[in-house]
Amino acid sequence: MAPPILSLVLPSETGRVLSSQSHTVQGYVGNKSAAFPLQLLGYDVDPINSVQFSNHTGYLTFKGQVLNGQQLWEFIEGLEVLAIIKYVY
């Protein structure tokens, strides 16, 4: 018996997903855990890491950076220039 087909038709015209989530170097949370399953379903995933930490914040210590609002807009504007996304004002 053949395995079930997970996805035949993408729900958007482009099949792209802009995923703005956290990221950890060690462990699987946020974009690190979301991108691969979406790609398996046929989506083209464009991840923006809202934070990038060494590990999950539930541990005693972690190090990393947090993306601020201006930096996020710079990513959005860069993608808009390339016509990868269309932001509706």
Image (cartoon, rainbow, N blue to C red):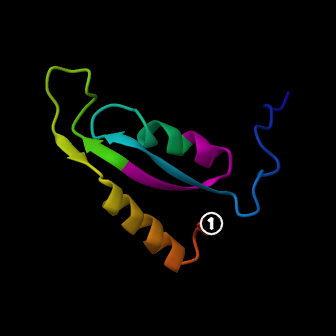
Q: Nearer the viewer, residue 6 or 21?
A: 21
Circle 1 sits in a helix, a strand or a loop, which is it? loop
In magenta stretch: residue 48: yes
Q: Is residue 17 above or below residue 74?
A: above
**58 versus 11 height, above or below:** above
Q: Position of residue 77 (x, y in %)?
A: 45, 72
Determine the residue positioned at 85% across, 27% down.
1
Residue 27 lies left or right of residue 32; in this view the side is: left
Asked whether 9 or 3 is in front, the reply is 9
Q: Which residues are magenta?
A: 37-49
State which quadrant residue 51 falls in: top left
Q: Is residue 39 magenta?
A: yes
Picture coordinates of residue 31, whole percent (x, y): 44, 43
| Residue at the limit of the structure toward the bottom, as seen here | 81
Place of residue 26 in the rendered image (x, y in percent of width and height, measured from the top left) = 27, 34
What residue sits 46% from the left and 65% below the top?
A: 76
x, y percent for residue 24: 31, 38
